[in-house]
Amino acid sequence: CNDGDLYLLELVSNSTLEGCSNVSLGVSEIVQGSGPDLCPLRDSGYCVDDITDLSNGAPFAYEISMLDVGTPYYVRVSAHTDESFGTYAVSYPEFAVPSHLQPGAPPRVRLVRSEETTITVEWDHPIENGGSPVVGYELWMDDWEGGNLFKVYDGTSDAKTTMFTVAPDNAPYLESGRKYQFIVRAINLCRATDDDLACYSDFSEPAVFTVRSPRPPLAPPQALRDAAGTSIGARGIWGDGSITVNWMRPIDNGGSDIINYRLFMESPDGNVTQVLLPVDNTTIAIDQSETYTEVIGDQLQYRHTMNYLDEGEVYIFQIAAINKRGRSGWSSPLAVVCAERPGGANISHSIANSTGRYGLIKPTVMDVSATSIGIEWDEPLDRGVSPITGYEVWMYPGAPLNTQADPEPVKQEIQMIRSIVDTPVSEVQVLTITNAQTGGMFRLRIRANSVIGGDIDSTTELITLGRCNATCLTDIIQDAGGETLGNVSVTGPKIINSSHAYTISFDHYVGPLSALAIEDHSLVDKSNSATWYSNVVRSVKGTEPIRGTFTVKYDGYETPALPYNINAYELQRELNNLESIDMVEVTRERSYNDGYGNGDNFGAFVWTVTFINVMGDLPLLYPSPGRL
């Protein structure tokens, strides 16, 4: 157990040593020992752990977490008995380097447009990026009816392109009237020890489309009941119930944009109601009060509420999609009872303020014997107009008594979802011109296409080398970039030998910029033996606040794509719609980097999820960050 750089042995006395001259003893270190690394979060302060649960038997396993990507780690194991610790051997392999993983498979390819001789498809980013940003995509297709697959689009270094048009010039097997299978996979750079090694995701599920003129779309998937939007209205008033349904767009739009959906509802008496719903008016609501809101419409589900329904009755819902060529078939029917859960299903208010609407049932202990306890309870005051079909009884062995200090010893599971982002920084570039004569002139091209910062592609007026100081260059760049670029600060030129170096900070622009480029110049060599050249070095890459979408998984079920700044009510709604979750409450707060609520949160939030009517130590929610 004596590992690491140890203290030197201490000689207490050498008084019994004898010799014909002076006798002395000394201690020195020949090899410095290697010990465990520092782990400040552990009580000991070192990366050491004691494993005492040996019930599963050999081989024993242990997971080491909270490691840094790209750092090699060496591990040793020593057995312990009553006689202390034994010796250890070198692990195999000798060390391991944590790396990112390959991305998850993207969703299925969708049809955007089809013509007699071309077909345009699109795809979405995967919800799992493996911990490393996706850098590109490959689109593959077959050569007709499940034949050989070939790569029709190679976007290895283009993560922004998620749409491609297949035509005879890039797909020689393409023929009008034939069906083709499309799959896509994502690419990242996941190996910490090799920055250039591409890692490929699994392919998406295949999608089959026909090359032909547009036609009516395929039917959408079956609609789903929305828990939060289904209500029996005010108690004691008949006919003010409401049912809300959600649905997703079809994978095949017929080759033409979907412009409307038609909602079909059949009442218990056989009456049919149809509602035409323009696409722009049916998307899920998001929190528009936050800065940097980004909506990815195709990934957000559609929703509509039917009002003035009879409580306790069953209604049938179907959805059809409409494009310029006509209407699709109806989706599979969905039967919904206009009812709520016992005690009220509307949980838009906190449980502390509306316990009367939760149907809280307090059992009464009636009989206690040596081996049994008898209890009884009453029906909830509010059954939600649906018949009670049964009860669920929970017992908590070993729960402590209710006390004044802890009146609720049985705890509800509370979990936290938190988004974290580093404080965004502004882009800084260093422009250096070497071996050019003073007085030569040049222009700078400024380019950027950040989602938040905006698009820029402009060229400055002429700049004279050696005669344009920092203030001059600042004004010229700001004039060229305009309001989109915003304020710029320049230092320099720093002149060393034959080089002029300008440090340019893009203080206002949000996001990265392309490297500045010299254009339309009259720069000449300083001498016959010194050829002029220039280079631009990015010293700081501009970053952005959080944007995009994420999903939440729980026990095998997953929400649709959620905006990065989704409000508490909408997240609560989507979680309650999962089949694996019965009832939760959600609150949301801003997440600040300093931990004290100061400054900007840069799009980061904390969602606190309380499980209302499922007890025990529950599995963790899993937020997927791949599209943030």
Image (tube, rainbow, N blue to C red):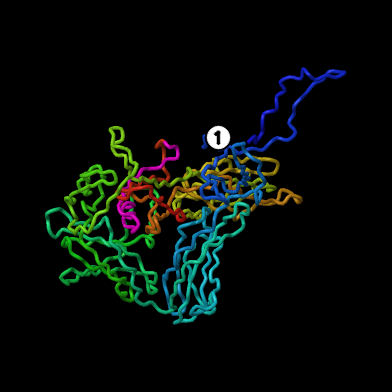
| Spot occupied by residue 146 in the image (x, y as percentages of width and height) | 50, 78
Side of 510 where 226 appears, left or right: left
* Residue located at (21% from left, 49% from top): 359
Q: What crowding class fits label 1: few (fewer than 14 Cα within 10 Å), some (14-19), or many (20 or more)?
A: few
* Residue located at (18% from left, 64% from top): 313
Q: Is residue 188 magenta?
A: no
Q: Residue furthest front?
A: 370
| Spot occupied by residue 490 in the image (x, y as percentages of width and height) | 55, 41
Residue 387, quarter of picture: bottom left
The total number of labels drawn is 1
Residue on which disc 1 sits: 45
Question: Residues in magenta?
Answer: 570-595
**Compared with residue 192, is residue 311 higher up or lower down, i.e. above or below?**
below
Q: Secondary structure at mark 1?
A: loop
**Compared with residue 463, is residue 179 higher up or lower down, i.e. above or below?**
below
Q: Quadrant of the N terminus?
A: top right
Q: Is residue 574 magenta?
A: yes
| Spot occupied by residue 194 in the image (x, y as percentages of width and height) | 63, 54
Front in this rendered view, residue 139 or 499: 139
Q: Is residue 354 visible?
A: no
* Residue located at (57% from left, 51% from top): 58
Residue 309, quarter of picture: bottom left
**Compared with residue 155, is residue 149 higher up or lower down, i.e. above or below?**
below
| Spot occupied by residue 523 in the image (x, y as percentages of width and height) | 65, 51
Front in this rendered view, residue 253 or 333: 333
Side of 259 where 388 appears, left or right: left
Q: Is residue 326 visible?
A: yes
